[in-house]
Amino acid sequence: MYFIYDDHFLKHDNGISHPENPERLKYIKRAADSLEYRGLIEYISPGPAGKKQIEMVHDSSYINRVEELSARGGLSFLDMDTGVSRHTYSCALLAAGGCMDGLDLIFSENSRYKKFFLACRPPGHHAFPAGGSGFCIFNNAALGAKYALEHYGLKRIVIVDLDAHHGNGTQDIFYEDSRVFYISFHQYPHYPGTGAADERGSGKGKGFNLNLPFAPGTGEPDYLAALIEIVIPLLDDYRPELVMVSAGYDSHVSDSMSSLELAEDSYRRIMASLSHISRKYCRERMAIVLEGGYEYRSTADSTVSTVMGCLEDNSFKSASDLEKYFGIDDSGKGRVKNRTLLDRTAKELGLKQ
Ligand SMILES: [Zn+2]
């Protein structure tokens, strides 16, 4: 797949001893180099988005504010922990531009690959139209989805958010929009406080927002059960034209930003499941955008697993084949922690009696 990266992303600075720092990407880049060596990825250097493109999601007054704070230099804060410094604006434009460049690549008829991974900073899923928060400046995934709607005339896009924190910005942007189905797996209750199971969208977007709020200590069995019992059946019905993934690796057991317990191999299985949807409905097109992930080693290893999961030749045809494919037995099913939540959600969505 295409692997979109630029050293410029290392220049965004949140201040000293901040968890969202350039080391994250240095580790990811080193791990990606081994994928390139094996011929599994092709590096692409992105170009910046224009201000007009950022306005597809964000208010011009907010965009100007980030630009001005960056130009001023020094370190300012949008909230308690979201820094803006000299290179923040240019990095944020490059991150958003990277998502749009990736889409242009995978939508071009003679493209070598149909999937891309965008390894960028700053992340995006906590960014709202009028302001950034939670380390996020511009909402890269939301901007990519808007771009695909407007530029490629898509009508149905799914964004699956694997970050340990609820993507409140992304949910907010598409809450009344049936063209973008936002599905989030996250720890709950946890920062930022949103993401309850009953937040299902409103107006035209009613039924096109799904939260899977997991208890602390939740690991892979629940993610796979939710995919098999809920997410894949819903997407079989929705038939998305593009799968987007907000790839946050702070759900890894080693990451101190959450109490979720995914292993790096869990990301391979989750991504293979989502890749199956892209194969079935999206001509294999898939856009993966980095969000959180603060333990350097597990974030880099999980990035590799993400790429490997997408490349896995999935022989399964339906959600029920997944159990066999991943060798899920009764003990795996027995380890599902949020059984009540999954059963209730499936029932409310008409997927289970
Ligand atoms: Zn996060």
Image: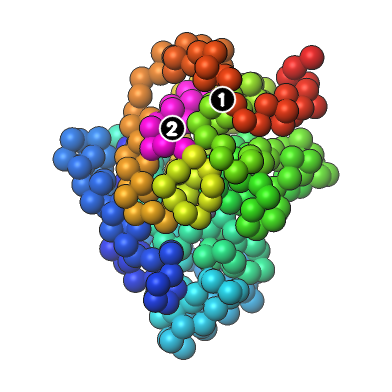
Q: Is residue 201 above or below residue 22?
A: above
Label 2: which secondary element? helix
Quarter of the figure with the C terminus: top right
What SS does tag 1 mark? loop
> Which residue lies at the image location 63% right of the left edge and 21% below the top edge?
229
Q: What scheme was used to colour the molecule?
A: rainbow
Give neighbour class at mark 2: few <14, some 14-19, many 20+ (Cα, 10 Å): many
> Does residue 205 appear anywhere in the picture?
no
- Which stretch is magenta? 262-277
Q: Quadrant of residue 223?
A: top right
Res. 353 mark: none
Q: Which residue is mark 2?
A: 266
Q: Which residue is mark 1?
A: 335
Quarter holding the N terminus?
top left
- Asked whether 96 or 327 is in front, the reply is 327
> Is 223 situated left or right of 115 in this image?
right
Q: What is the x, y in percent for residue 331?
A: 52, 17
